[in-house]
Image (cartoon, helix red, strand yellow):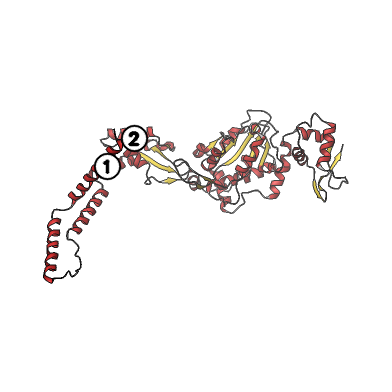
Amino acid sequence: MDFKKIACTAVRRWNEKRMAGRAADVPCDAMPQAATTAAMTKTDVAEAGTATPRPTSVPQHAPNVLRTAEAKTIQSETPSPKAANLESALGGFLAERYEFCFNVLTEATEFRSKSDKGNGTFRPATERDLNAICLEAHRHGIDCWDRDVARMVHSTDVREYHPFRQYFQRLPAWDGRDRLHDLAARVSDSPLWIQAFHRWMRGLAAQWAGFSDGLHAHSTAPLLVSDEQGLGKSTFCRALLPPELQAYYTDSVDLARPDKVERQLTEMGLLNLDEFDRIPEKKHPLLKNLMQLSALNLRKAYRRHSQALPRIASFIGTSNSRELLSDPSGSRRFICVLVVHPIDCTGIDHAQIYAQLKAELENGERYWFSHGEENALRLHNAAFYRICPAGEVLRRYYRAAQPNEKVRPLSLPEIFARLRRLEPGAMAGVTLPKLAQALVTAGVQKIHTHYGNRYRVVEL
């Protein structure tokens, strides 16, 4: 069979039917009017003897055609009485029994039954929930479809809310009592820890409440370290969030999927790097970059274009090993604290704690760490560095020179050659960059000379 010929014939017949339909739409009084106009034109030409052009008059039926088309458009835009009654009945039914809101972080519509209002918990409206609502509407005599319910629930008529902004807006006034000191002391009574934890909590609140200026990312994370398990480190991390925001805590952070972590930074409140010591060393640069982000360009689901989204989440971590950090320069990003006793996670007054942080931010108190504070953290974290083979060998044969001690600075190849000669087995696989990092970790001063970099070390 000639499919091409059949297709052409079908298209021609369809066009003929369409043109016939258009002709049928023209009002019946149009033809007499057009014929009269043509006859008058011929008479005028005959009487004048010459074809004198005259202004062409607009056919009288044109306004009628336009009015007909306009009426059809208005009629199509105006909902039928049946549709209006259905919308009114369904809208009243939903408003009477449910509360709906649109979460701008997750971009999901949430709801709760007004009969369960005392629980105060909204949950995402799933397809199963919408079907149940539709069936309940049927039982109350409302003849609606599931798509009618979904159209209302997922429309812009549903109010929007930001979970963290809303929480801070509803906080009570601060009573003036410092509760951050007591909260930090539940973990350790170290003065550096108490001060650093307070500033870190202020940075966390700044991102949640929208006080962040976009210039200072919350790039620091506490690391709760202990030699044994069962001291409540992870429980304390979770307990930092108030009950209303518990859904925005997670300890499922997969650095092997950085795109997922970036999305978590815009949707969650606190990311717990549980068992930090198990994070591969090669992932530490990625973690450092993620911690320094203040905003992210992401393309959310069902979106064609990416959009700039502010960062909401902060990092915290736990570990059962003291060997955590490998980069001395990057160690200033962490607040390592040794936990030696079980942490009391009960009776935390979240409302007054965050009211205090809100008051401090409104008073303009700093929520980021200064260079001096970062250097203090770097020195404090020296006890939590990972001990590499190069570092162990280095400690056996060299020590860092004192500031006023006279020494002959050595180059990196000189130190490397001596250690390779003395400990060939232990130095197997050690490279010059790793040895240089071990020197920095050991606190050896590096000086710049005309002949290159030298290290102020003393041979043992």
Say above or below: 350 vs 342.
Answer: below
Give residue 441's mark: none
Residue hosting label 2: 133
**Corner quadrant of residue 424:** top right
Name the amino acid type tagged 1: Val
* Element marked by disc 2: helix
The spot of residue 278 in percent (x, y) is 64, 31
Q: Is residue 411 left or right of residue 152?
A: right
The spot of residue 191 in percent (x, y) is 69, 43
From the image, state whether disc 1 or disc 2 is nearer to you.
1
The spot of residue 443 in percent (x, y) is 78, 42
Q: Is residue 51 left or right of residue 242?
A: left
* Element marked by disc 1: helix
| Front residue of this view, candidates 436 and 220 | 436
Comes first in the chain, label 1 or label 2: 1
Residue hosting label 1: 11
Name the amino acid type tagged 2: Ile
The spot of residue 20 in percent (x, y) is 19, 47
Residue 240 in view: no
Question: Mark 1 near mark 2, Cβ–Cβ under 8 Å?
Answer: no
**Residue drawn 71% across the image and 49% down it:** 372
Q: CA distance from mark 1 to mark 2?
A: 46 Å
| Front residue of this view, candidates 137 and 358 | 137
